[in-house]
Each structure stands twice: as C-alpha cells, then as structure tokens.
Image (tube, coloured by chain):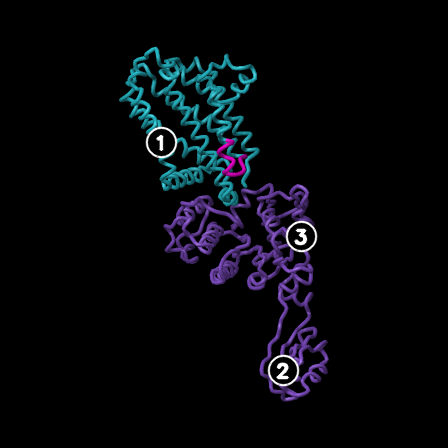
Chain colours: A cyan, B purple
C-alpha cells in the first residue's frame, strides 16, 4: 500500500497549502513568535546572565521543539476529527486503504511542516543564538525526529477515538499541555508527587526531554539508549492500541 | 444452469444498543440485475447495505458477496466493488481530477479517469475544488469514484437524495448506463419513482424487516390488483352501462366524471369495449395505475414519507 501512502501524503500536502490559515498557523506563527522573543531577550539569554532562569537559557531549544511537536499532535487530532465528522474517513474506508495508511500520511505531512518550521527557526536563530561547534546539530535533529514520531503516536491514539471536531480541541489540549508540564522540562521528575511520576513515565515527552537535553549538552547516544528504547516502546504501544480502537465515523 | 448470485444475504440481524436496526433480512441479487432496497428513512436500508459492503459486522446471519465474506475478506472485496455512500464527503480543497487520480492509484487496475469524467459530464470541473461543486456534481463525482476500478458490483446508497428533479433525471440515466455495461447494481432509495424506473427487482424494507421481494410490476399486481378508470362523458345512462361491466366493482361520481373501479388488467379493456359498443362520446379518459407507493401503503399501513 506504499503507493496509496505516498499518493495520499502528496495529496494532503497540496490540500494543506491551499488553506492559507493552516500554513500561517503551522509555520508562520511559531517562527514569528520565536523571532519576536529572540529580539526581546536574545542577547541577554546568550550571555547566561544570572537573572535568566536555567530553563530559558539552556532548555529553550528543547522547549521550542516540544511546543512544535505538541502543536503537531493537536493539529493531527483536529484534522482526523474533522475528517471523521465530515464523512471523509467514511468514504476512504470504502476503498482498499487501511486506517494506518491514512494516519501515517497525515503524520508525514505534519513531520514535513514541523521540519520546515524548525529549519527556519534554526536559520533565523543563528542571528540571536550563535551555535558553537559544541552543539551536535545532526544528532539533535535525529533525536528530535525520534521524539516527534513517538509523541505523534500519542496523537494517533487520541485521533483514533475523538468523536467530533468540537471535542478534538479540548481533549487534545487536556492531554498535551499537562504532558508538557510533566515532561521534566520545568520541574524535575523526581520532585513530582509519586502518582504523577508514574504518569510522567508513561508519556513520550518525558523521555524526549531527557534525550534532547542530554544530546544538546553533548552526551553520547549510549548514555540515552534507555530514553530511545522507551520512546520506541511507547510508540509501538500507542500504535497497537489505536489500531484496535480506530473509529471511522 | 444459472450463475450463482452476486449477493446472498441470509437471516441478517443488526442492533445498535437496544434498537434493532435490521432483523431476519434475507435476499439474493443476481448477476447483471439492478436490485433496490426500498423503504422509508430509518427502515434499515443503509445498515443492510453497509453490512453487505463489509463496513459493518452483522450480529447474526451470513452474507456472501462475489463469493467472499465481507467481514473476513474486506480488503479483497473492496478491490472488486464500487461504493457510493450516503452522506460521504471529500476534502474541501481536493480537486476533482486529483480525487479520481488518487482513487485510481488505490486499485491494481482502473479505467481512464478523464474519459470517466467526460462520460459523467464533469470534464469542465476537472480542476475545481470539491467544496465548489453543486450537489449533483458531487454525486456524479462519487459515481466516478465508484466506477474507477471497473467494479463487477456497484453500490449506490440514496443516490439522488437532495437533488433537484433535473439533476435526479440525469443521474438516473447514468445508473441505467452502468447497468447496460453489464454491471450488477445494488441501490437503496426512499423514492418509489426512482425504484420503479431503475430497478429490475426490489425488496421492500420496513422497521428492519423485508416485507416482500419482486419486480415492481409483480409487486403491484400481487398487492394492488385494483384498477381505476376515470371517464368523463355526458351520455345519458352512462352510470348504468358502467355498472353492467363484469369486472367493475363500483362506479363513483355523479357525472359527467365517473370513477370506475375494479380488479385486474381486464378492467380497462372491458371499459373501452363498453364505450365502443354503445358509441359513447368521451370527453376525457384516463387510467389510474397503482404504483410501488400504493404497494408500500398497503403492506405497511403507512406512507413511505411519514
């Protein structure tokens, strides 16, 4: 079904760029916010001044990456809900297409536009945050890809069951933003109440933060093989569940 | 030797929670025929059709389509059938030719999309977005998608609902065209006129059960043998002459318009013979032939649009 997947992906890319608001929201706004924020506090951040919290100075790239992954999850959930409610999934069902082909096509579209957004940010960001040779950009990009795919699999699961577009936004938001809060980016996992620690350990964002933070600081992949393994396991679990519970209408 | 049926449905039952949508439904569809499931909205037509298409699993009963089990061989079946669904949509900003091209790419073999669009009168809409099409154009596009893989069996669910009479007639011509190409057509409709014009045989469905199956003409003959002739004449003694006709059961009206009621096809002949024998001058003459609508009313006790 590779032909169907590539065909659908290409089709969805074309359809996506025909809606100007979608492109502005996905690529334009994040880049704009990034540039504005960088202009306001860029120089100060770069100096590692004591007044700037640690998460801004060191974790900003990771925070930005996660926010983009989160918005990719939300828009994946939204578009599948719209397709479900609008009867588009129903029509696609009466073809030899399988649900995962449809979901994967949308994930590829999201990944593509996420990658474009990030690439622009990296290019623009060079002005404000001179990246030294010590930042392993290739490794970071690779880590980001793994993290995003794993995070998107949670989006698969939510998208598989959300009944209507109206529900998509609140349900997506209710899951995605607390997930970021529990990811260890703002508060160390160890400082969370035990119950929340358990929840945090079942979410891909937690391992994504650990992996990305480590690689940004120059850790080797070996030191984070546990994170990568967990991202893979969670991906497989979420995919397997979503295949079971996928609703066409 | 007769060919095996294209569709065989036996004792199918489907419930949603406590609601029984379809119960004990059985019928067969023969190769090359246009078969219609008719009944009011909510009678279980779409549920039955979607079970046959493999989109829903019945709670009970067996279904065989082109020798396949729609539940187990859903993907194999999808390759050999063409489906037009009730209330389906495409992406708002997909172009007509993109939809046809993509659908063609999903099947191992397909017919020429451009020719298909031409046959369906959509050539000048090739580059139009789906959201800009009229209701009739959308339905024609869905027919194109249902035919793109040159299927042996075509499903059409409430094809003309919501269309104006002109668009409806154009779609009917297209459906007859599909039949003429030797394909088996399985359709649902709540329009009796549509069923009479398109279907070789129909199954009448009400409250989830099949009430009767047959050709439209057979069903009318079986359930509504009454015939009515309305004659307008100023001849003296007309009423008595009509009453003397053997097939006549009653004569209504005080003249000059008389409503002559009776049974069987011979009624009309006998009335005409009576008019001729007595050399009566007739101002107007028309027959009222029962339709599937009347059959439905008789069998269910309610009108189909209730």
3 vs 1, front mark: 1
Spatial CA distance of label 1 from label 2 is 81 Å
Q: Which residue is label 1 attached to?
A: A29
Q: Exactly how many numbered labels are in the figure?
A: 3
Tell me the residue at 35%/12% (across/down).
Answer: A51
* Left or right: residue A11 compared with residue B47: left
Vertical relation: B304 (above or below) A202:
below
Badge 3 marks a residue whose secondary structure is loop
Tell me the residue at 63%/87% (across/down).
Answer: B280
Is A243 or B152 nearer to us in this picture? A243
Residue B36 at x, y percent in the picture: 59, 57
Q: Which residue is label 2 attached to?
A: B256
The range drawn in magenta is: A161-171
Badge 2 marks a residue whose secondary structure is loop
Vertical relation: A87 (above or below) B216:
above
Few, some or many residues within 10 Å of mark 1 (<14, 14–19, 20+): few
Q: Chain of mark 2?
A: B
Q: Earlier in the sequence, mark 2 or mark 3?
A: 3
Few, some or many residues within 10 Å of mark 2 (<14, 14–19, 20+): some
Q: Quadrant of the C terminus of chain B?
A: bottom right
Numbered badge on residue B207:
3
Is A47 or B243 nearer to us in this picture? A47
Residue B276 at x, y percent in the picture: 63, 86
Q: Are marks 3 and 1 on the same chain?
A: no
Whether residue B153 is visible, yes or no, is no
């Amino acid at each position: 079904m590779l032909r169907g997947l590539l065909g659908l992906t290409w089709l969805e890319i074309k359809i996506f760029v025909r809606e100007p608001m979608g492109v502005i929201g996905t690529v334009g706004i994040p880049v704009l916010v990034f540039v504005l924020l960088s202009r306001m506090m860029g120089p100060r951040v770069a100096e590692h001044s004591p007044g700037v919290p640690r998460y801004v100075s060191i974790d900003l790239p990771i925070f930005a990456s996660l926010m983009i992954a989160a918005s990719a999850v939300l828009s994946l959930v939204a578009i599948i809900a719209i397709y479900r409610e609008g009867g588009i999934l129903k029509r696609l069902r009466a073809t030899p297409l399988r649900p995962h082909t449809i979901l994967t096509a949308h994930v590829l579209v999201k990944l593509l536009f996420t990658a474009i957004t990030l690439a622009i940010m990296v290019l623009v960001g060079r002005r404000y945050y001179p990246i030294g040779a010590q930042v392993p950009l290739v490794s970071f990009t690779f880590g980001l890809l793994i993290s995003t795919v794993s995070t998107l699999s949670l989006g698969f699961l939510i998208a598989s069951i959300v009944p209507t577009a109206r529900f998509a936004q609140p349900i997506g938001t209710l899951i995605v933003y607390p997930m970021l809060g529990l990811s260890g980016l703002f508060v160390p996992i160890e400082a969370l109440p035990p119950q929340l620690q358990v929840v945090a350990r079942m979410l891909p964002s937690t391992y994504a933060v650990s992996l990305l933070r480590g690689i940004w600081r120059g850790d080797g992949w070996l030191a984070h093989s546990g994170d990568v393994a967990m991202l893979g396991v969670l991906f497989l679990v979420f995919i397997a569940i979503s295949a079971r519970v996928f609703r066409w209408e | 030797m007769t060919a095996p049926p294209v569709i065989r449905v036996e004792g199918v039952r489907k419930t949603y929670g406590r609601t029984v949508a379809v119960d004990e439904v059985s019928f067969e569809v023969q190769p090359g025929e246009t078969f219609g499931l008719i009944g009011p909205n909510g009678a279980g037509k779409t549920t039955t059709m979607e079970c046959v298409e493999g989109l829903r699993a019945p709670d009970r009963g067996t279904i065989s389509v082109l020798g396949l089990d729609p539940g187990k061989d859903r993907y194999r079946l999808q390759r050999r059938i063409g489906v037009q669904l009730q209330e389906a949509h495409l992406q708002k900003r997909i172009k007509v030719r993109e939809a046809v091209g993509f659908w063609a790419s999903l099947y191992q073999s397909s017919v020429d999309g451009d020719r298909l669009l031409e046959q369906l009168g959509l050539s000048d809409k090739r580059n139009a977005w789906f959201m800009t099409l009229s209701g009739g154009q959308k339905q024609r596009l869905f027919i194109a998608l249902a035919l793109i893989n040159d299927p042996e069996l075509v499903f059409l669910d409430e094809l003309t609902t919501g269309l104006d009479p002109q668009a409806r007639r154009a779609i009917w011509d297209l459906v007859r065209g599909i039949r003429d190409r030797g394909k088996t057509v399985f359709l649902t409709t709540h329009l009796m006129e549509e069923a009479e014009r398109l279907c070789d045989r129909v199954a009448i469905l009400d409250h989830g059960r099949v009430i009767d199956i047959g050709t439209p003409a057979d069903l009318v003959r079986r359930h509504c043998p009454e015939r009515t002739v309305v004659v307008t004449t100023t001849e003296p003694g007309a009423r008595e002459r009509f009453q003397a006709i053997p097939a006549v059961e009653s004569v209504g009206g005080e003249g000059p318009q008389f409503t002559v009621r009776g049974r069987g096809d011979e009624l009309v002949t006998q009335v005409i013979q009576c008019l001729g024998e007595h050399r009566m001058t007739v101002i107007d003459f028309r027959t009222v032939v029962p339709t599937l609508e009347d059959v439905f009313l008789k069998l269910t006790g309610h009108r189909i649009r209730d």
